[in-house]
Amino acid sequence: MENVDPHPEDKSAWVKLGGNAETFFVQRMFSEGLSVMKNPAKIENPYTHDLLITLPADLKTIRTPFRTASRYGFDPDYAITINDKDVKRYLDKYPHIVLVLDIQYPNYQGIHIAPIERIRIAIKTERAKLHEYINRVGDSMGNAKSSWVFDCRWFQKLNK
């Protein structure tokens, strides 16, 4: 049987067709290992947003400003660091992970969301700068030997 789109002005037929497409899409994403579900609010309102997506996330609780960030061209009030070894692990094991940056500095407070792909691009384009910890060169305690420096304003802010 041939697929035929509804008449362009038949809104209810288009909504039904969209609902079927959403179901197929959710099933396809599940088979690819992504957690996507139809928005349960559509039962009451078929015109609300279609999907809810669950992504892996890691919380970064950031309380201490990187005071020497200006050496790398960053304002210390907005500079954050993420361990290089963490970035590598995220890229290798969790290609869809999102970092939630809970920043509570004396001069700035905010919660930002940083998809690993945005972090990768900042590193690749050399916007992010690598900071080597000179006191950790011979570290055998598992501490990171280097971290990437970012400006938190590069990432979407979630709170007001």
Image: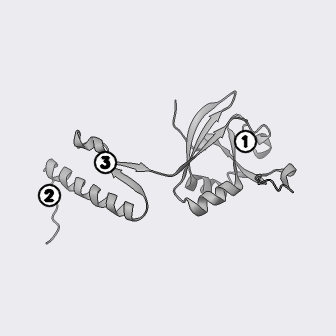
Please tell me in which quadrant of the rendered image residue 70 appears: top right
Q: Residue at x 28, y 41 (%)?
A: 41
Instruction: Confirm whether residue 13 shows in the render.
Output: yes
Q: Which residue is mark 2?
A: 6
Label 3: element kind:
loop
Q: In 3D space, how far apart are the residues under numbered discs 3 and 2 (Cα atoms)?
A: 20 Å
| Count of numbered circles in the view | 3
Crowding around mark 3 (Cα neighbors within 10 Å: few <14, some 14 to 19, many 20+) is some
Closer to the observer: label 1 or label 3? 3
Residue 129 in picture, x, y percent from top left: 73, 51
Q: Which residue is mark 3?
A: 50
Q: Mark 3 or mark 1, which is nearer the start of the sequence?
A: 3
Amino acid carrying mark 2 in the image: Pro
Mark 1 secondary-structure assignment: loop
Q: Which residue is mark 1?
A: 74
Circles 1 and 3: CB distance less than 8 Å? Answer: no
Marks 3 and 2: which is nearer the front? 3
Q: Nearer the viewer, residue 15 or 39?
A: 39
Badge 2 or badge 1: first in the primary sequence: 2
User: How far apart in space, not on screen, are marks 2 and 1 (Cα)?
Assistant: 55 Å
Residue flagged by tag 1: what amino acid is it? Phe
Q: Residues within 10 Å of mark 1 (few under 14, many from 20)?
A: some
